[in-house]
Image (spheres, rainbow, N blue to C red):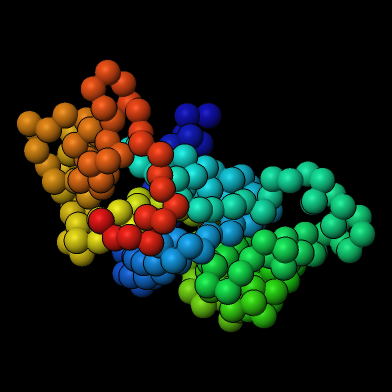
Amino acid sequence: MKHLVQKQLAQSIATLQAVLADEKISDTLVTIAQLTAHAMQSGRKLLVAGNGGSAADAQHLVAEFVVRLTDNRPALRAIALTTDSSILTACANDFGFDQIFARQIEALGAPGDIFLGISTSGNSKNIINALHQAKKMDITTIGFTGNDGGQMRDLCNHNIIIPSTVTMNIQESHLALEHILCMLVECFYFNPTTAAKPCLHSPLSTTGHPFATVDTARPHSSQHPLIPNSFRPQTGGPKIAPFPLERRSEKW
C-alpha cells in the first residue's frame, strides 16, 4: 500500500504545483485579500459558506480570522454560515436545503460585505442561491471552486478555480489558499506599507510569518511588524489591550 500513499501525495503536489504556476490565481487572491481587508476596515464583514468538506473549510477559515492565524492581533469580522444547527434545520425544513445560506445572507448581510462561497463542483444549489441573494444586496461575491468553475463562475465577482477534477485535491488547494488569504488580509489590514512589498520568496522570520522582515535578533510576536505597539504582549504574559471599536477603520 506504500505505493498508493506515494501516488496520492504526488497527485496532491501536482495539483498544488499547477495552482502555483497559474499567476491568475495568485493575482486574484491578492485582489480578494485587498477587498476583504478594506471591507473589514470599513466595518463590514466576511461571510463564508460551503457543504461537507467545504463547510469545514468555511468554519476553519473563519476561525483563523476571528481568533488568529499565526500571531496575536485584534479579531477580524467573519461569520461561517454553516454552524447554527437551529437556523440550518429550520430553514431546510420550512424553505428547503437550497435556501439555508441565502436566508442567512438576507438576515446577516449588508451592502459592502464580502461573501465567499466554496464548492468543488461550482454547482452547489444552496451556494448558487446565496450568490443571487448577495448580488441583490450589493455584497461582493467570491467563488472558490474546481473543475471549470461550474455555474458559480458567471455569478461571482471574483473566482479562484483550481485546475483539477479530483474533489480531494481541489479541497487541499482550497485550504492552502484560504490560509494564504487570511495571511494577506492580516497584512493589508494591519500594515498596508508592508503589504505593498510582500516577501513571499523570503525564508520565514523568527515570528514564523512570511511578511515579517527576517531579523534573527527579534524575539517572537512581541515585535511582529503586523501588530501595533498597543496590542503587543506585555512583559509577564501575552496580554492584549482591548480593541476600541472606533479604531477599526484606522490604518496602521
Q: Nearest the camera: 202 or 212?
A: 212
Q: How many marks?
A: 0
Quarter of the rendering containing residue 181: bottom left
Q: Is residue 244 left or right of residue 82?
A: left
Q: Position of residue 118 (x, y in %)?
A: 59, 60
Above/below status of 130 relative to 170: below
Q: Nearest the camera: 44 or 216?
A: 44
Q: Residue at x 29, y 60 (%)?
A: 251
Mark yes or no: residue 155 visible: yes
Q: Residue at x 92, y 59 (%)?
A: 94
Above/below status of 204 relative to 245: above
Q: Residue at x 78, y 44 (%)?
A: 85
Quarter of the rendering containing residue 40: bottom left
Q: Residue at x 64, y 66 (%)?
A: 109
Above/below status of 4 relative to 167: above
Q: Position of residue 46 (x, y in %)?
A: 53, 59
Q: Quadrant of the C terminus?
A: bottom left
Above/below status of 78 relative to 135: above
Q: Nearest the camera: 11 or 136?
A: 136
Q: Nearest the camera: 166 or 145?
A: 145
Q: Is residue 164 left or right of residue 218?
A: right
Q: Position of residue 131 (x, y in %)?
A: 65, 72
Q: Position of residue 122 (x, y in %)?
A: 62, 67
Q: Is residue 216 left or right of residue 72?
A: left
Q: Is residue 202 left or right of residue 105?
A: left
Mark yes or no: residue 147 visible: no
Judged from this view, the residue extending furthest toward the right is 94
